[in-house]
Image (cartoon, rainbow, N blue to C red):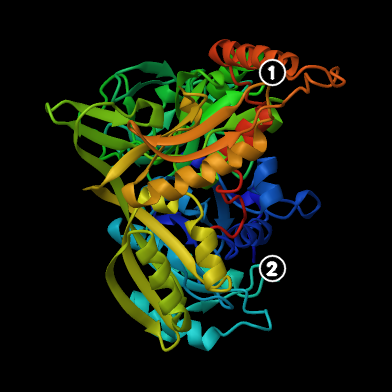
Amino acid sequence: MPATPNNVPEPSRTDPALIRNFCIIAHIDHGKSTLADRMLQLTGVVEQRQMRAQYLDRMDIERERGITIKSQAVRLPWAPTEDPANTHILNMIDTPGHVDFTYEVSRSLAACEGTVLLVDAAQGIEAQTLANLYLAMENDLKIIPVLNKIDLPAAQPEKFSEELANLIGCDPDDVLRVSAKTGIGVDALLDRVVRDVPAPVGVKDAPARAMIFDSVYDSYRGVVTYVRVIDGQLNKRERIKMMSTGATHELLEIGVSSPEMTSADGIGVGEVGYIITGVKDVRQSKVGDTITSKDKGATEALGGYKDPKPMVFSGLYPLDGSEYPDLREALDKLQLNDAALVYEPETSAALGFGFRVGFLGLLHLDVIRERLEREFNLELIATAPNVVYRVIMEDGKEHTVTNPSEFPEGKIDKVFEPVVRATILAPSEFIGSIMELCQTRRGTLLGMDYLSEDRVEIRYTLPLAEIVFDFFDNLKSKTRGYASLDYEPTGEQDAQLVKVDILLHGDRVDAFSAVTHKDAAYAYGVRLVAKLRELIPRQAFEIPIQAAVGSRVIARETIRAIRKDVLAKCYGGDISRKRKLLEKQKEGKKRMKMVGSVEVPQEAFIAVLSSEENAGSGKGKK
């Protein structure tokens, strides 16, 4: 019998033995948000008339693309079949599936004791399934394996139950089978959560300790901080202290999400809830920080986790230079909802004033850019994404390069680039083409395992710069869409990298510079000068377009001058007069060439710099 909101125990009086904290993890598009919808319906926290698909996806961009970008916590009452007299409280967190938002998953796992590992019964285990599973194992969580979409005609529950059981080390019969769309098996899954996920352990009378696992900005109430109480209790109107910064605040409101915010007098051991202190800056509520009482508070903080580090950098410039202050304000506001966003001002001779922005990956870049354009009505140019390089000069000086224009001149001793460990899952018939693709991207094979007769897991070390552009698109086309990719940073390696400059009429254009591998520099230079030759209009004088590495030109194209026919007015007459007119024109062109500057149209910058053709933006990425 599903519980109704009326018989939910008061948040501050819930016995920890009746609490279960769990999250749902899976590869992208395996049905996490749909399963969360069925749980909301089954437990009665959302009335049927208010229900909509992907209820917990609050952003328009999430709903349009069908992807989850931010984790959402929700409190569900459930009376299990075996013990209907005791209504349990299930704190469930719906997490994103995309590799770019792994940090959202890791912070959610730290707030739970168990996790539901969801696998599509038609597609089987994919790369992000494995990545999230290993994260859950590192956190010592109880894992409940579940096959979703068993109602599909293409579903192969027997095959994938065995695959999943071999991976986790359980019996195939222990793998639950559900259909999140129709609701089959969801009640059995909730019963299993109550039975298998351990109750939270904490000291009720100890000084309060709560861990921040998420924070969002509300334009009316300021920062809403989501916490998981480990020890003690947090009460309304109490003064609290952030242990990492020492800042103190008053708890103006405290409560739980069910799934809308419901205020309470306090929350106790094992509970997940939200607090509002009136703070206006998300950076004052650091994810991973410990909250305690100001008076007689805890002395030892909980083990937190690191801030997410940006992996990809791109320059964002307004098309209209006067919109620069608007872009700064928009980024400030966006950072309040996304603590992983980092940016700093930069200027470009070609593009004017803009910002160098750090992202977790290409989808993160794409989402931020779309939100800036849509929510703040801005028109932007995004320069081609690049990674962070570490350059050591012969005199021992070290430079960190986030923008090709920062690449130092002079004698370079070593250049280090970030590398990642990539995991690719695909049908075994595509092994050859996958290995060929990875070899051309300077990959090193780490190993290969067969998950079943016809599915293989291939592990490679690859430079991050080689996969942030079109690697995934090429992988999908070579495997007819069957391969899935996951990657994690593993450090850096020494590489033979050079900076390719583009010179227009002898002047370097910083916006077109790129750092590439020595072997790829020539191809990059040839491709770019050919593209620019098509895009830049002819002018009154000849324009050479050159690609150069240092002082050595590696590619050149010439835009021929527009020639005015100065002899049109001469009908016959002496040849010396014609020659005189031509010499005069030649002198004029020479003088123009010396003082003339090449006007590069905005369209040329957009076409060359736009990361759109490189940055995949689809739901199926990775």
Q: The residue under label 1 is which amino acid type? A: Arg
> Which residue sits furthest left?
395
The residue nearer to you, when weighing 404 against 264, is 404
Residue mark closest to the camera, 2 vs 1: 1
Q: Could you tell me residue 151's position as x and y percent?
A: 67, 79
Q: Which residue is depicted at the point 44% across and 66% down?
A: 127
Q: Closer to the camera, 271 or 546?
A: 546
List the residue tagged with mark 2.
Answer: 181
Q: Compared to 593, does 488 lie above or below?
A: below
Q: Nearer the viewer, residue 474 or 591?
A: 591
Q: CA distance from mark 2 to mark 1?
A: 84 Å
Q: How many marks?
A: 2
Q: Secondary structure at mark 1?
A: helix
SS assignment at label 2: loop
**Whether residue 560 is situated above or below residue 294 in the rendered picture:** below
Residue plotted at (71% across, 15% down): 576
Residue of label 1:
579
Q: Residues within 10 Å of mark 2 (few under 14, many from 20)?
A: some
Q: Is residue 622 left or right of residue 200?
A: right
Q: Quadrant of the N terminus?
A: bottom right
Q: Is 182 above or below relative to 10?
A: below
Visible in this render: residue 585?
Answer: yes
Q: What's the residue type where badge 2 is placed?
A: Lys
